[in-house]
Image (tube, grey):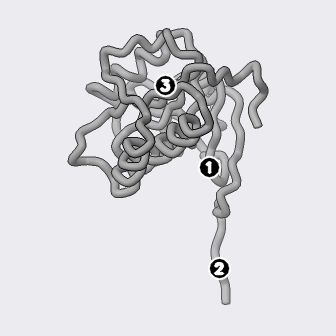
Amino acid sequence: MLANDVLDLTKVLVIAGSGNNGGDALVVARLLETHGFDTSILLVGKPKHRSEQMEKQLKICEYYNVKQVFLDEDFSKYTMIVDGLFGSGLSRNVSGDFATVIDHANASGVKIHAIDIPSGLNGDTGQVMGTAIKATSTSTLAYVKDGMVKQGAQDYTGQIFIDDIGIYLDDHYEE
């Protein structure tokens, strides 16, 4: 669990991309909202590119009336931003609305918590792919990604928490 000085959940903005990381972010948004936290979601990316999981989680958020905001939102009015734009598989430079949202989040002065890996940070090399979230903390799933421990990556990951979800780096099943 994160220390109270790291997370202020008074007013949370969850930024969600169109892939499975965005779906994970929407799960976080729904859980925060249904536990009484003032939560808003900002969807980034084209609807036709949404993953099946992302679409499913979006429908659940709509059922619970989680507020949606748009690109012109003032990020600085939030107490916490949750980053769920891209996961560890990012292999191209961030551009367009995605880059705009990352830059607005970084400039807001609000603490950012990244899901799996800060968006824009390459999971293998630790290289910034054009622009990247500068997270206060990151909850990475299953294991730390190689790029997260490369020189300079800590400026983007902040404090790293490893969330056990039942899979492991060299996990395999032998009969």
Look at the picture and state if 115 lies above or below 9: below
At 60% across and 32% down in the image, what residue appears? 36
Q: Can residue 73 be spotted in the picture?
A: yes
Out of 22 and 13, give the one closest to the viewer.
13
Secondary element under disc 3, as helix, strand or loop, is strand
Residue shown at the point (45%, 14%) measured from the top left: 75
Closer to the chain start, of discs 3 and 1, is 3
- On residue 141, which mark appears? 1
Compared to 61, does 113 lie above or below? above
Q: Is residue 124 left or right of residue 7?
A: left
Which of these two is toward me, 169 or 44?
44
Mark 1 against mark 2, which lies toward the viewer?
A: 1
Q: Mark on residue 173?
A: 2
Q: Which residue is mark 3?
A: 13
Q: Amino acid at mark 3?
A: Leu
On screen, residue 5 versus residue 165, left or right, reads right
Residue 151 location (% of width, % of height): 64, 29
Percent x, y for residue 22?
42, 42
Tag 2–tag 3 contact (CB < 8 Å)? no
Q: Position of residue 139 (x, y in %)?
A: 64, 40
